[in-house]
Amino acid sequence: MVIAAWTIVILLFVIGMAGAVYPVLPGALAIYAAFFVYGFMVDFSPFGFWFWFIQTTIVVVLLIADYLVSALGVKKFGGTRASVIGSTIGLLLGPFVIPVAGLLLGPFIGAVIGEMVVGTEWKQAFKAGVGAVVGFFSGLVVKVILQLLMIILFFIWVLL
């Protein structure tokens, strides 16, 4: 049972870290779910109030920051709400429509199209697209760091 639990926990950690890059995967929620899998299949006793408080706070920050960091990148480059919406759609569809480069091109193209739809001139739309890519990478860095922190804290609580 313990081996199965650790296998599922590690699998959820991998899915969670992949979710930092691919938005269709659950990301931080998969990592958070791994804590429950460990608790139900092995033991909840290592997890006290502070573990759950810290982990839940990180998840909430991640969920809020995921949207805000990307939106700030677009806004910083002069984009509007239309480019934020467009880049989000592009981020979700890009990897499927353009398999190799869709993760980068999707937000860029989505932001540009979003701006063009509302009548923004192409130079400003292009800048908003660049902002979408900058926001994506900034958000990616934040997600990877915080999700790694979640995993490290899990191992500290369980193994020490």
Image (cartoon, grey):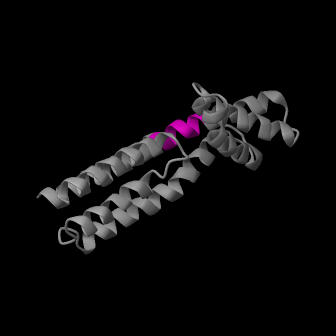
Name the residue: 68% across, 39% down.
90
Residue 11 horizontal/vertical position (percent): 34, 47
- Image height check: is 105 above or below 33? above
Name the residue: 62% across, 47% down.
71
Residue 140 horizontal/vertical position (percent): 48, 41
Name the residue: 85% across, 32% down.
121
Q: Is residue 74 magenta?
A: no
Can you see residue 80?
A: yes
Could you say which quadrant of the image residue 88 lies in?
top right
Task: Indicate the quadrant containing the N terminus: top left, top right, bottom left or bottom right.
Answer: bottom left
Q: Which residues are magenta?
A: 133-140
Could you say which quadrant of the image residue 100 lies in?
top right
Left or right: where does residue 21 sit relative to residue 70? Answer: left
- Image height check: is 49 above or below 103? below
Most distant residue in the top direction: 100
Characterize the magenta stretch by its predominant secondary structure.
Answer: helix
Left or right: where does residue 150 sit relative to residue 23? Answer: left
Left or right: where does residue 38 sit relative to residue 85? Answer: left
Most distant residue in the left direction: 160
Task: Indicate the quadrant containing the C terminus: top left, top right, bottom left or bottom right.
Answer: bottom left
The total number of labels drawn is: 0
Most distant residue in the bottom direction: 49
Can you see residue 131?
A: no
Name the residue: 36% across, 44% down.
14
Residue 44 horizontal/vertical position (percent): 22, 71
Residue 99 horizontal/vertical position (percent): 60, 28
Left or right: where does residue 137 sit relative to residue 54? Answer: right
In depth, the one of 47 and 100 nearer the eye is 100
